[in-house]
Amino acid sequence: MTTSRNIESAAAAFEARYGYAPTGVWSAPGRVNLIGEHTDYNLGFVLPFAINRRTYAAISLRQDQTVRVMSSFSDEQHQIELADISKNAANDWAAYPFGVAWALAKLGQTAGVGFDAYFESDVPVGSGLSSSAAIECSTSLALNELWQTNLSRPELARVGQLAENEIVGAPTGIMDQSASLLGERDHAVFLDCKSLEAQSIELGFDDEGLELLIIDTRVAHRLNDGGYATRRAACELGASQMNAASLREVSIDQLGKAKEIMDDVTFRRVRHIVTENERVLETVEKLRTEGPKSIGALLNASHVSMRDDFEISIDELDTAVDVAIRHGAVGARMTGGGFGGAAIALAPIAKVSEITLAVLAEFELLGYGKPNIFAVTADQGARRDR
Ligand code: ADP
Ligand code: MG
């Protein structure tokens, strides 16, 4: 987390691998979603923020059309010609930078030259903190400058999403890239997934002495057991039963009618989305007027809604949330797609160690695997470091 060390070491590793110095080093952060879960594909609201864990990309353009990428994750070098980038051209991590080059050439309407890149990262992989957006956005910010494509940051978010959808092959939304590109220190990114309009919202965690604890259960997301697809299908069914284009158009007032016309499961899925959108709006309002200590009840209610209505929590996440609240967290909830992954707890810095020890003890008592617990702060989005 000492950035200057990461910057120098990424540049030095680039030079050691490729035999010449990089033109520059760019970095982009991972992100955590404070509130607004499963609302993105229902065209609702989300409130993520960029975290103080980053991926550093040391990059130089080449004279030819070749792209070479390396990462501190492995010694292997991946190479491709720009014109050969397509789905299945790479079935490993190289698909992310390759995909970004492909997507930027497409949206930036330019045929750039090839490049050499070296990546170093302290974003945990697979904890739901979007190491994928970090690698995409560090690459897209660098190439946007080097290729002089001059796309805006919202357009670069779209580049990352396109890379992930078309080349990596993951059907993800635009939240992660938006947070990674638009984040600011001690601010969250309030994103309207319908208009794609983004606003920076001051969190005030710094002034209030709060940190966000990530409690990664290390239970692997089991998104492909059908849980994610069935949730999406239920949301689509609910919207069509309400004659709405999406659940974004359904208000709290209409839930009474929804309850009358829907089966119980569909109704509860719908109620989660509709109330979650409302909670995001209320969180933004409370941050603006009363400050971060006032959002605890909304975080807790979000968790209960995901546990009971959307039914995507697991015992480990429920335990993490309960213990964190009992030991002084302002509020806590599971975050991410569900069926595993991490919980977050907003906590006074003075309570962080007590909460950490209590969660570790409870997990051990219950025979759960050891969670990985660490604090994050809201940090600046993608930038050029040198
Ligand atoms: P998440 O984004 O939640 O961390 P994903 O599965 O979306 O999880 O993305 C993780 C993948 O991104 C890794 O498996 C790897 O392929 C790639 N990745 C992320 N950061 C790096 C990096 N610094 N070097 C190489 N690959 C990376
Ligand atoms: Mg990801």
Image (cartoon, rainbow, N blue to C red):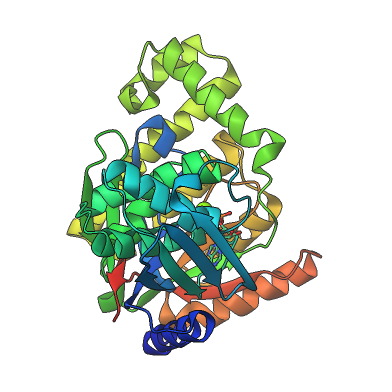
- Left or right? Give the position of 207 relative to 300: left
- Left or right? Give the position of 205 relative to 366: left
Q: Does residue 70 sit above or below 17 in this rendering?
A: above
Q: Percent x, y for residue 128?
A: 54, 57
**Which corner quadrant holds the C terminus?**
bottom left
- Left or right? Give the position of 264 relative to 252: right
- Residue at the image point whose x is 57% and y is 30% from the top: 231
**Which corner quadrant holds the N terminus?**
bottom left
On the question of residue 359 being in view, the answer is yes
Q: Percent x, y for residue 205?
A: 31, 71
On the question of residue 281 being in view, the answer is no
- Residue at the image point whose x is 25% and y is 58% from the top: 287
Q: Percent x, y for residue 311?
A: 61, 38
- Residue at the image point whose x is 61% and y is 28% from the top: 230
Q: Nearer the viewer, residue 293 or 82?
A: 82
Which quadrant contains ligand 1? bottom right
Q: Nearer the viewer, residue 262 or 217?
A: 217
- Residue at the image point whose x is 54% and y is 53% from the top: 95
Find residue 264 and report its image quarter: top right
Find residue 243 and report its image quarter: top left
Q: Percent x, y for residue 215?
A: 58, 66
